[in-house]
Image (cartoon, rainbow, N blue to C red):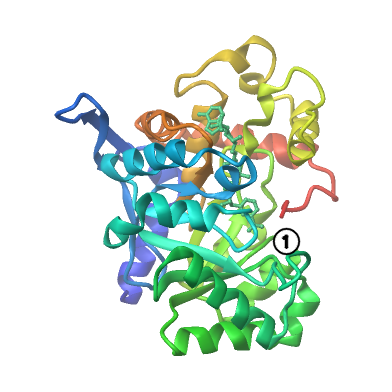
Amino acid sequence: MSPSTSSRRGFLKSASVLAASVPFARLGLGQDGAVVARTLEKRRFGSTDMDVTVLGFGGAEIGYGGVEQAIVDKLLNAALDAGLNVVDTAECYADSEVQIASAIGHRRKEFFLFTKCGHWTEAGRGADWTKDGVTRSIERSLKRLKTDVVDLVQLHSCSLEELKKGECIDALEAAKKAGKTRYIGYSGDSQAARWAVESGRFDALQTSVNFADQECIELTLPLARDKKMGVIAKRPIANAAWRYDEHPSDGYHVEYWNRLQALKYEFASGDARKRSDAEGPAGIALRFTAMQPAVDVLIVGTTKPERWAQNAALLQAGPLPAEREAAIRARWKEVAKPEWIGQT
Ligand SMILES: NC(=O)c1ccc[n+]([C@@H]2O[C@H](COP(=O)([O-])OP(=O)(O)OC[C@H]3O[C@@H](n4cnc5c(N)ncnc54)[C@H](OP(=O)(O)O)[C@@H]3O)[C@@H](O)[C@H]2O)c1
């Protein structure tokens, strides 16, 4: 991308301009009556050659949730039919990689395939950030994904200390050189993510971005944009933590639930939580995340075949009005505690 295109891209992504711009998606019905994205906004993924749809698929839930293969088949094929072109998974999301290959491996040319590495060992537990460990993890993913090359491999949230040692990055760069992955990235948050962006060694950053997790909006996103990195928003719908009336039994959703209790956004409290349109919590969450600087794709996780079309429909409303976005940012700045760092 030329510098002029890049600065234009940065300009177009500023909230105030987006507020007056086109919707993230326009939907219609296909021949069989299914919802299809007539136009789903595509964004150039950093300085790569990929134009990614603003709404992608996060593969953790199908793996951890042990979702039946027939449901995964339906979910992923419907999403591809309707226009999605990014599928993100990882080495350690149980059998997510295998489920994805089985469901849409035959359609490999129709989507960009992203995975992660390092958070897996031969023993099946823990992580191995040595050069051999990372290399083995990538080889295993290629086999499980039934492909010779993926579009992106990301270090799966290794610590700042491991990043500084550098062995894991060397292994990733070697995999790129060997043609096993077209691009390389870091998936993680806070100071480790900042270091990864500053290092200039990664094509992409995957990081938590949502209205209950805003540290990255100043810490890493502007710099990632300056460095022309592709940016993937993980946990983009804040784990839908507002859905719980009481403290969630799923420990993974507790942190955002606690934060929402303190943030007291009116649209994510009381009866307002029940709204399922673009002005309800899910719609506001997605629209807020999609308009943050440098964000290219939101990888929403789900176990439900109908979700992707629902979420694409919510994005039809386009960016939040500038005042609403500013109010969400202001509330965060007022309420967020120093320990509310980006959640891995
Ligand atoms: N360290 C890392 O690298 C890391 C960490 C976390 C996540 N990730 C990646 O990011 C992806 C997304 O993160 P995530 O799944 O944790 O968080 P998320 O996408 O913010 O939340 C997913 C949850 O939201 C629910 N949901 C989705 N759309 C909804 C809607 N319109 N209304 C109500 N609920 C809705 C889903 O439930 P249903 O099943 O009911 O749809 C699911 O339980 C993961 O799948 C993974 O690929 C990476």
Q: Residue at x 45, y 36 (%)?
A: 71
The answer to whether residue 40 shows anywhere in this view is no
Q: Position of residue 184 (x, y in %)?
A: 51, 75
Read off the residue under disc 1.
190
Q: Which of the 4 image quadrants contains residue 335?
A: top right
Nearest to the observer: residue 282 or residue 9: 282
Q: Residue at x 32, y 74 (%)?
A: 1
Nearest to the observer: residue 335 or residue 114: 114
Q: Position of residue 45 (x, y in %)?
A: 39, 64
242 sits left or right of 113 in the view: right
Ligand 1 lies under 8 Å from the Cβ of mark 1: no
* Dot 1 alpha-carbon crowd within 10 angstroms: few under 14, some 14 to 19, many 20 or more: some
Q: Position of residue 82 (x, y in %)?
A: 28, 39
Q: Residue at x 72, y 84 (%)?
A: 130
Dividing the image into four equal quarters, which quarter contains ligand 1?
Answer: top right
213 w.r.t. 258: above or below? below
171 w.r.t. 329: above or below? below
Nearest to the observer: residue 83 or residue 142: 142
131 sits left or right of 32 in the view: right
Most extreme residue toward the top is 271
Quadrant where the image shows the C terminus: bottom right
The answer to whether residue 89 shows anywhere in this view is yes
266 sits left or right of 3 in the view: right
